[in-house]
Amino acid sequence: MRAPKLLTIAGTDPSGGAGQSADIKTFSALGAYATSVVTAVLAQNTCGVRDILPLPVEMIRAQLDSVFDDITIDAVKIGMIGDLATARVVRDALERYQPRFVILDPVMVAKSGDILVDRDGLRAVREVLIPIADVITPNLPEGAVLLDTDTPESYVEMEAMLPRLAELGAGNVLLKGGHLRDTRADDILWTPQGTHWIGAERIATTRLHGSGCTMASAIAALLPQRDTLLEAVQDAKRYMNEALQQAARLDVGKGKGPAHHFHAWW
């Protein structure tokens, strides 16, 4: 069976743990061929974000056309989109080229706590990109930002948030529960057919840099290789948990270090 060909549309991370670096490593670790389109250049590391330089939309459009004109893309993972113009260029390309799967990670807050988008960027995600996504993967703070509400503090509140997130227009919603103060880190998957809890014990680690990027990319990599979305999400969760469990082996950075994307290989 041929390796699926994937595209990440996201910002950079020179420290290697988040953004496109995490996406490409995850795609590769899970048996997919990675291509990439850069939306913004970030100066960041495991301690925080220092600066962000959005790329001109003309260059983003040229990158998208260069990839899609040459390569049949099986799945797209969208990460950091900071403004409406960029979101519209991305949506236009996806509607023209029609990749099989689109997974959107609504990147708004870095693990360091740095805010990555303004109101314009929020509108871009909520109104332009979510309606064309097959799956969105917000964590609890991101879900709260999207709905302009308080962050859930229990699994009951978390589940209650799902219908409103679904109303934003995505095909499916994976709401991640890692921010809850609990011994577990369960996620919940909403589909038009019903909801499914994806359970996991909480892993005692501070090495969470790029974990949101990694989870969304794992789903993108596995969707073309699994029979159902639920199977892809369950296997992505297992991969993510093991990457966090093995993260200490890397010993990278002075802040929130990255997950170990190649834990099964090294």
Image (tube, rainbow, N blue to C red):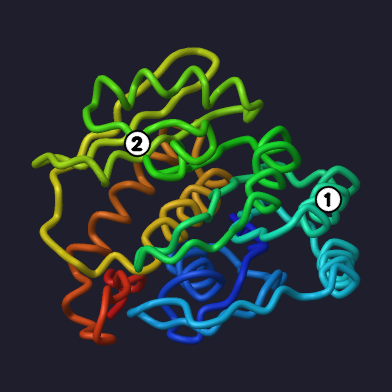
* The quadrant where residue 144 appears: top left
Number of labels in the image equals 2
Three-letter amino acid code at the position of disc 1: Arg
Q: Residue at x 67, y 53 (%)?
A: 121
Q: Residue at x 83, y 50 (%)?
A: 88
Image quadrant for the C terminus? bottom left
Q: Is residue 58 visible?
A: yes
- Residue 221 is situated, as x and y percent measured from the top left of the image, at 53, 54
Sequence order check: which comes first, mark 2 or mark 1? 1
Q: Is residue 5 visible?
A: no
Question: In front: 226, or 178?
Answer: 178
**Circle 2 sits on which residue?**
151
How far apart are the alpha carbons under marks 2 and 1?
28 Å
Left or right: 84 in relation to 259: right
Q: Residue at x 11, y 59 (%)?
A: 204
Three-letter amino acid code at the position of disc 2: Thr
Left or right: 239 in relation to 59: left
**Circle 1 sits on which residue?**
88
